[in-house]
Image (spheres, helix red, strand yellow):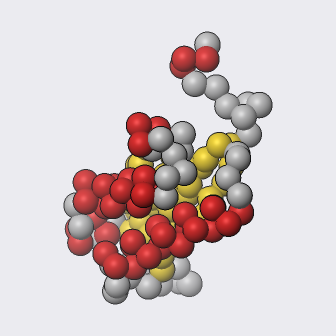
Amino acid sequence: MPHFILDCSKHIIELKTPKELMQAIFDTANATDLFAESDIKVRINPFTHYTIGNMQDDFIHVFGHIVYGRSDEQKAHLSRKIVSTLKAMFPEVPVLSVSIKEFDTSTYVKKSMV
């Protein structure tokens, strides 16, 4: 935990490499000191087919999935830091957003738990 999943227009990974983009999100999440470095996971889903307001403007949305226990202020700080990082990397991209959701630990299971 946590998982940061980036949905983006395919053009985004032509502007910066997937490795650069994932590393920037990793570094930003790690710098908040909310997570153990070894627990941070980042993935990218580039989309070819999408619409935003009936147009095909570039976009990045980061879905952050974390275990409960952080305050609303910590989650808001994390979101702001991620958007700030993306804004610095992609000043021309019109849609940059983040949502942070908490995992339901009663239903979360991973390999080491079975």
- Residue sitting at the far top: 114
In this rendered view, identify the residue nearer to me: 18 or 54. Answer: 18
Q: Is residue 32 visible from the viewing direction of this image? A: yes
In the picture, which quadrant includes the N terminus?
top right
Residue drawn at (59%, 49%), measured in percent from left and top?
65
**x, y percent for residue 18:** 27, 57
Residue drawn at (44%, 76%), measured in percent from left and top?
84
Instruction: Work out whether 22 lies above or below 113.
Output: below
Q: In this view, does 20 lie to the left or right of 113?
A: left
Residue drawn at (67%, 66%), measured in percent from left and top?
73
Q: Is residue 50 visible from the viewing direction of this image? A: no
The quarter holding residue 29 reads: bottom left
- Residue sitting at the far front: 33
Residue drawn at (58%, 68%), measured in percent from left and top?
77
Q: In this view, does 69 lie to the left or right of 80?
A: right
In this rendered view, identify the residue nearer to me: 14 or 85. Answer: 85
The quarter holding residue 11 reads: bottom left
Instruction: Work out whether 105 lies above or below 35.
Output: above
In the picture, which quadrant includes the C terminus?
top right
**x, y percent for residue 106:** 77, 31
**x, y percent for residue 14:** 23, 68
In this rendered view, identify the residue nearer to me: 55 or 79. Answer: 79
Q: How many marks on residues? A: 0
Instruction: Work out whether 31 lies above or below 55.
Output: above
**x, y percent for residue 55:** 47, 84
